[in-house]
Image (cartoon, helix red, strand yellow):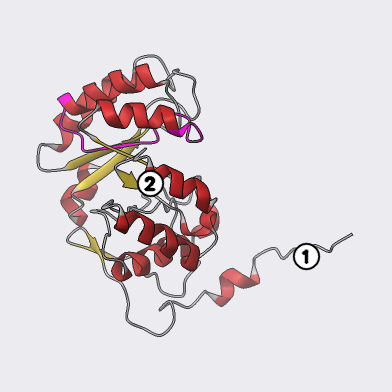
Amino acid sequence: MCRLRDEKGFDAFKVRVGAEVGRNHDEWPGRTEEIIPTMRRRLGGEVALLVDANSCYSPDHAIEVGRLLEDHGYSHYEEPCPYWELEQTKQVTDALKIDVAGGEQDCDLPTWRRMIDMRAVDVVQPDILYLGGICRTLRVCRMAADAGLPVTPHCANLSMVTLFTMHLLRAIPNAGKYLEFSIEGADYYPWQEGLFARSPYDIHDGQAIVTDAPGWGVEVSPEWLARSCYMASEAA
């Protein structure tokens, strides 16, 4: 992360705390309590720090971790409680000053309406593909805009979802501060390697540039398509 800060100009980083749906357990004992101050110490005060708890905590424990984050100058606390328990997340949001974020898992528009109306989060994070496309995501963005909430979409890999998100952020008035941009490589997402004839994901001075080329502005590599597996399903 220090190398990316210095070479590419990244000025914000996000890491996981807790364990995915971990019922208050960590990936290993003491990891969260160690990584929070270490990130701040190593990356310095000019870099924004964000965390994702992936539905790990009960409200009481989430608030404890949130106060530790506040003490070290973090600015974004994602999915602190089980994402389907909106009332639990709201308890955390109401108790803390740090921005609480969520919504990546949600694809039901009435649930989005309830989440926004009750102010369960400070930042909404729809995933364009989980939610069902650009049009449905724009509906969520409008709900959030009407409520005065920013939108920082979830996009966890460098497939088309990040490209869709880049275009979306240019098109809405309430875009959040950041584009979520994966730094995991081929070991984590081997299928994303070589997807595009020319990658649309060059970073200059910490920013991604959205192409003005026709359509989405990319060409999927013929070689990538040729080595892909094709599957078809039929109704019984």
| Residue ranking furthest to the bottom | 214
Q: Quadrant of residue 203?
A: bottom left
Q: Does the magenta stretch include residue 84?
A: yes
The residue tagged 1 is 232
Pick the residue in front: 187 or 41.
41
Other-residue count near label 2 (Cα within 10 Å), few / some / many at <14 / 14–19 / ≥20: many
The residue at 32%/27% (across/down) is 92
Task: Indicate the position of residue 205 as horizontal and vertical percent values.
Answer: 17, 61
Q: Does the magenta stretch include residue 34?
A: no
Q: Residue at x 58, y 73 (%)?
A: 223
Query: Which secondary structure lies at badge 1?
Result: loop
Q: Quadrant of residue 142?
A: bottom left
The answer, for residue 194, to whether it is visible in the render is no
Q: Give the range drawn in magenta.
A: 71-86
Mark 2: which secondary structure?
helix
Circle number at residue 48: none
Q: In this view, does 129 lie to the left or right of 78?
A: right
Observer able to see residue 84: yes
Q: What amino acid is at disc 1?
A: Ala
Judge left or right: residue 47 versus residue 61: left
Q: Residue 116 carries which label?
A: 2
Determine the CA span between mark 1 and mark 2.
38 Å
Check the image and report above or below for 168 versus 212. above
Q: In x, y percent, where is residue 178?
A: 26, 53
